[in-house]
Amino acid sequence: MKMQITSAVMATVLAFAAPVLAETATEGWNNAGGEQDEALGLTPDHENGIETYEVCSACHQLNGWGLPDGTFPQLAGQHVNVIIKQLADIRAQNRDNPTMYPFAKPSEIGGPQFIMDVAAYISKLPMNPENGIGPGDNLELGEKLYKDNCVRCHGENGEGSNEKFYPRIHGQHYNYLVRQFQWIRDGKRRNANPDMVKQIASFSDEDMDAVLDYVSRLKPHPEMIAEPGWVNPDFDW
Amino acid sequence: MRSALTALILGTAVLSAAPAFSDAVKDGKRVYMTKSCMACHGRNGAKPIATYPALAGQNPAYLLTQLKAIRDGKRVGSVDPETGHPFVQGMTDIMHLLSEDDLKNVVAYLAEQDPAKPEVLDPAPTEDELAAGAKIYKKLGCRSCHGKQGDKPSNKAYPYIAGLDREYLIRAMTEIRDKTRTSGKSKMMFGTIKRADDDQIAAIATWLSQIDRNAE
């Protein structure tokens, strides 16, 4: 069940989609084109999303909650567009992730329909009620830094924006946030939004720890969070 | 009467030993499915993706050595030209998730699984190509450690190699021959494989990849 994308189709898609997706202030940040654009236009299939997710669950766990030590992020409830973009970036090697690389490939995950199916499925999973949080010893600084630097893109409550491809960061594991933030600041995460790189360039490690500790404690809307002990009923093991 | 009693005592002894072993297998299954192994090595260790090896029915002592070598950076191997990272990098990066007990349990679980079915090669190898691989395998002396068809290791520390992914087999043999992989007992294998050229390695790999351990 693999989609063959002819180069003619890809060229057409790119021609139509690129102007829509280009960010004026961040030219080139979100021009992955290709499979990403194809996926974005498709209607998700819930059953296929479950089937496709099974392989993802090996790392992101059946609930989509990742691991609290931050090795694997919490994906549940993440914006569909964000998931699709990150998969596309990992596939295109815009984002370096040796563990995940095989799974971003259409040959493993399936083509754009599968990408949309799994992204939509993940986006609807209830979020981790007990994500990994920081040490809690510098939250006043963290809150100030967040309000001064992050709200514009990630929102008052860390909810991000699906339309703008800004990730939801509340409810995420502290250690994962730290790793990504560090890599974005220091240039190792190459698909980082250039505006963000500029914004956090002057953050010290202490600033980073403080602001992310604050973020890790931001709570999504109660309707989005699972009850503690919730087990994903879509899988039987 | 006496032999029945002996049988009863022995039977009970076996039964009381069984729970500890089956716990290891059960715990190992949980490790396998929740600590990311299944993602690359597939359901029951028998459906790996890309060119990663199947692990089902492998010798647990061998698996344990490899897990530790990969974890500790002693087995790094060749670089995947697609990513610029060693093929094992994705695994090295997550090995901190496994405790010593996890390692023991997961290898116990994997050893109990039915071996993977051979992959379907396209185009299918000819009888002559398979025979050529078998011949080189015999000539080099691979049998003495891996068995007549790569399916009877002479030592619990040596791996079953029958039925593994062809590209993986080529990579393993090449890495050992070229001293890219020197961890564990691969130094011992060097002497045997050093005489093989790339074509011979490919021929052996083709033949081995088609052997179905389940058919025996």
Image: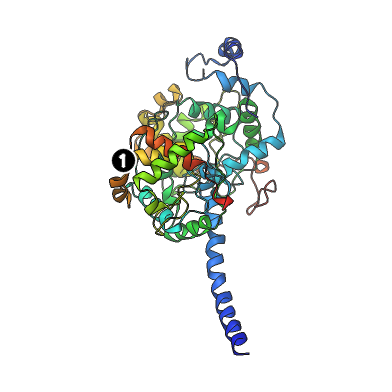
Q: Nearer the viewer, residue B146 or A44?
A: B146
Give the quadrant of the N terminus of chain A: top right
Residue B23 in percent (x, y) is at 55, 65
Kind of residue at badge 1: Arg
Residue B28 position, x and y percent, is 52, 58
Task: Provide the chain ID for the residue under circle 1.
Answer: B
Position of B22 compared to B84: left or right?
right
Quarter residue A97 falls in: top left
Mark 1: which secondary structure? Answer: helix
Label 1 crowd (10 A; few <14 / some 14-19 / many >=20): many
Q: Is residue A80 above or below residue B141?
A: above
Question: With respect to residue A233, does A26 lie above or below?
Answer: above
Q: Residue furthest bottom?
A: B1
Q: B101 and B115: which one is in front?
A: B115
Q: Write the residue at 59% across / 82% down.
A: B7
Q: Position of residue B42 (x, y in %)?
A: 55, 44
Q: Position of residue B172 (x, y in %)?
A: 39, 41
Residue on which the image places disc 1: B177
Residue A65 visible, this angle: no
Front residue of this view, candidates A180 and A121: A121
Q: Is residue A34 visible?
A: yes
At a point 71% along the width and 37% down the height, the residue shown is A47
Frontmost residue, A137 versus B154: B154
